[in-house]
Image: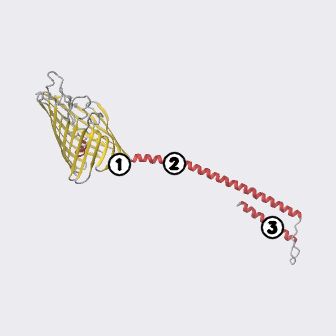
Amino acid sequence: MRSKLLTVAIAAGLGVTSFSALAATSKSPQQPARVTVDAATLQQLQAQLAALQAQVADLQAKQEAQADAQVETAKAVNDVQVAATKPTEDLSKKLDALNKIVDNTKIGGTMFFDATNQDHKEGTGLNSPVKKDGHGSTNGTGFDVKRFYLTVDHKFNDTWSANLTTDFSYQSSISSTSLFVKKAYVQGKFDPLFTVRFGAADMPWIPFVEKWYGYRYVENTITDRSFEGGRSGGTATAGGVGAFGNSSDWGIHALGATTGDNSVNYQVSVVNGRGYRNLSRSKTVDTEARFGYSPIEQMVIAVGGYSGKRGNETEGGAPTRTATRGDALVAWRDSTWGAGVEYFHSTNWDDILKYAGTGPGVGAAAGTTKDKADGYSAWADWHFYDQWAVFARYDNLDYKYNNLVQVEEKIKDKYYNAGVSYDVLKNLKLALVYKHNKLDGPVATPYHYKTNEVGFWGMLTF
């Protein structure tokens, strides 16, 4: 722009000078003018033109240099902008990856707690029961966190996922705190009717019954509720009878289900046999299975079974026999009513080892201990108003075993509870409950105990 202006100025200057010279040499309007320029004037004009040309060239050079500087500056600015954008892009990618992990990961927890008063009495023979601490019960008032499950679920894609669930518990009656890994598995879901889990996962029976029962935070189901006492002395499992199943175990689990009316569900688990608290090996594995049918969505009819050595068959160990358990369930649950009956029968659940005794008079001719058990549990609940419900349950268990001289001895356990529950929040339940448990021991050496417990039980989920 500046060079053009200078060119115009030069041209204008030259034009004015020429016009002046022309005017000065004109003699008359009728006679053509002759332009005469002396040598000095011409030399002066040439010098002025040269000076102006030099100035134009200098300005053009400066303008070109300025243009080059502007190009370099623009390039530098662009480089800075690109450099500034790259960390932003890297950060954006990292944030996207983090968001993906967060979106595909769920963290939750479940806590069972209670604050109760317990009254426990024991007696032997014809003696009247007296207050006594023992068999898992302590007289008095206490607060317990029976279970605290912390769960992490992560979804890799539509097929593969993983689960980790820890199990923490504290019982004031025995001043004991424990922490275990209850579930740790990788899952592949290939179809609603075919899912496979590898690791420690829910077993087919106990967790399934718990979902229909609905009051696990108040009491374990009958196959999961161990009772203390009964067997003691020279037996393979001195000190009492435990639960008749595991809620979780290490192995391979296949399961599937359809939904709605006329739906089916199943699960087959091949496991170690000692439960999630004992990750051990044995020569054989155990199998538990379940099949269920729902003629309508609110009802289920299910059967199941267990067979195995419960992790006791080891190389060079004692001879073993097979433990078995058969299960049956009929249950109903809708938004107002819930009811169900569970039954089980087991053989050799405690006497897997062919224990022959070691005391005086016990030899090769003596028999080995064997056990069998039959139990049933019936429950019902009614949501009579908004978040309020009443519920009750009754369990009856007959446990029989042969002693070392093949005399059958019997233990009978009766349990019931009743209470009212209130849903404080969607994820917080409280229940005021009364529990009663009575156990009568073998006829040969009779003993009995009973426990009354009253207080609050609760469940918190998040």
Quickly name the residue at label 2.
Answer: 88
Q: Residue at x 43, y 46 (%)?
A: 98
Please identify the quarter of the rendering in which residue 304 is found.
Answer: top left
Query: From the viewer's perspective, is 302 left or right of 58?
Result: left
**Gap between marks 1 and 2 measured at Cα:** 33 Å
Quickly name the residue at label 3.
Answer: 16
Q: Which of these two is toward me, 96 or 11?
A: 96
Query: From the viewer's perspective, is 156 left or right of 394?
Result: right
Query: From the viewer's perspective, is 191 left or right of 340?
Result: right
Q: Amino acid at mark 3?
A: Val
Mark whose residue sits in front, 1 or 2:
1
Q: Residue at x 35, y 48 (%)?
A: 159
Quickly name the residue at label 1.
Answer: 159
Which of marks 2 and 1 precedes in the sequence? 2
Residue 31 lies, in percent from the top left, at 87, 77
Q: Residue at x 86, y 77 (%)?
A: 29
**Gap between marks 3 and 2 measured at Cα:** 64 Å
Q: Amino acid at mark 2?
A: Thr
Residue 347 lies, in percent from the top left, at 17, 36
Q: Which of these two is toward me, 364 or 254?
A: 364
Disc 3 packing (10 Å; few <14; some 14–19; many ≥20): few
Q: Does residue 205 appear in this view?
A: no
